[in-house]
Amino acid sequence: MAPLSLQLAVLYAALGAALAAAALILISLVAFVTARDMPPLHRHEGERFFLDARGRKEALPSLGDPPSKRLSVVVPSYNEEKRLPVMMDEALGYLEERQTHGSDKVRVVTLVKNRGKGGAVKMGVFSSRGERILMADADGATRFADVEKLEKGLEGLRPWPDRMAIACGSRAHLQEESIAQRSYFRTLLMYGFHFLVWFLCVRGVRDTQCGFKLLTREAASRTFSSLHVERWAFDVELLYIAQRLRIPIAEVAVAWTEVEGSKLVPFWSWLQMGKDLLLIRLRYVTGAWRLAPAGKAE
């Protein structure tokens, strides 16, 4: 007969496993019950138009329309009076050099309601005219000319299945330098977040959060049509959707510089993103969230 201590150890292990299983089931049930339907791309009346150079209202295009430009750039912005002008000067200066036709460089879509960063990017993507769509952050932390690196990364993925491909800017090559400049606590948070991304959602992409991403029009349509998360973790769901759809993804090293003024609060923002990662995984696994069918653009 096994010693009493061994029996107790086995009993505690079984009890612990049962509690863990019960907790997982409970969390999955909560994730399923609290899951929202995909946020509809409802445009308020003021979001259906933009003002042209003469101050006249002009209807915004749809992602379902044929492309009329080579490249569209989507820049989400909220209270960015200081950083956005610097970023726009750099971007417009670069685009001016490579633009061969057309004069309407900037269209401002003013959102009636704060939709979060993911919701703002989604609105911009669905109002784009380009064959390729670039996401870029308003802080200008990434050198805009590195879009050429993303284009090369995109071309390196050919042949594109159903004309879909994504190139992600990456700061992973700067990780050692960033660790040296961070506190131990922030470094721990960073490693914990990266582990959760790898364990729960996206594998093969070391830096999911860099805001510099280039998508073909078809890839943007398929991924953003299924996007649910509207906060900071939307990048992770975007790439999770892309991997489920087997859209090829290239990760490309880009030049990046820390710019003051970030709205992310390290602990609370990362805690929120960690919760979002768990819910993304559970809601797709339980069927609470599903991928939008092909051909649904808006």
Image (cartoon, helix red, strand yellow):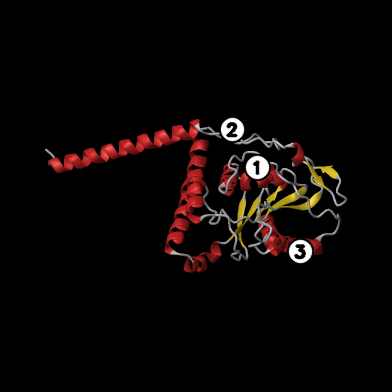
x, y percent for residue 280: 52, 41
Mark 3 is surrounded, within 10 Å at the Cα level, by few (under 14), some (14 to 19) or many (20 or more) other residues, namely: few
Closer to us: 108 or 55 = 55
Question: Badge 1 is on which residue?
Answer: 224
* Quarter occupied by residue 153: bottom right
Side (left or right) of 284 relative to 217: left
Side (left or right) of 195 relative to 291: left
Q: Secondary structure at mark 3?
A: helix
Question: Badge 3 is on which residue?
Answer: 94
Side (left or right) of 253 relative to 73: left
x, y percent for residue 146: 68, 63
Residue 161: in sight, yes or no?
A: no
Question: Badge 2 is on which residue?
Answer: 37
Nearer to us: label 1 or label 2: 2
Side (left or right) of 281 relative to 294: left
- Compared with 156, 234 (above or below) is above
- Compared with 34, 61 (above or below) is below
First in sequence: mark 3 vs mark 2 = 2
Closer to us: 238 or 39 = 39
Inter-mark Cα distance, 1 to 2: 14 Å
User: Residue sitting at 15 percent across and 43 percent down?
Assistant: 5
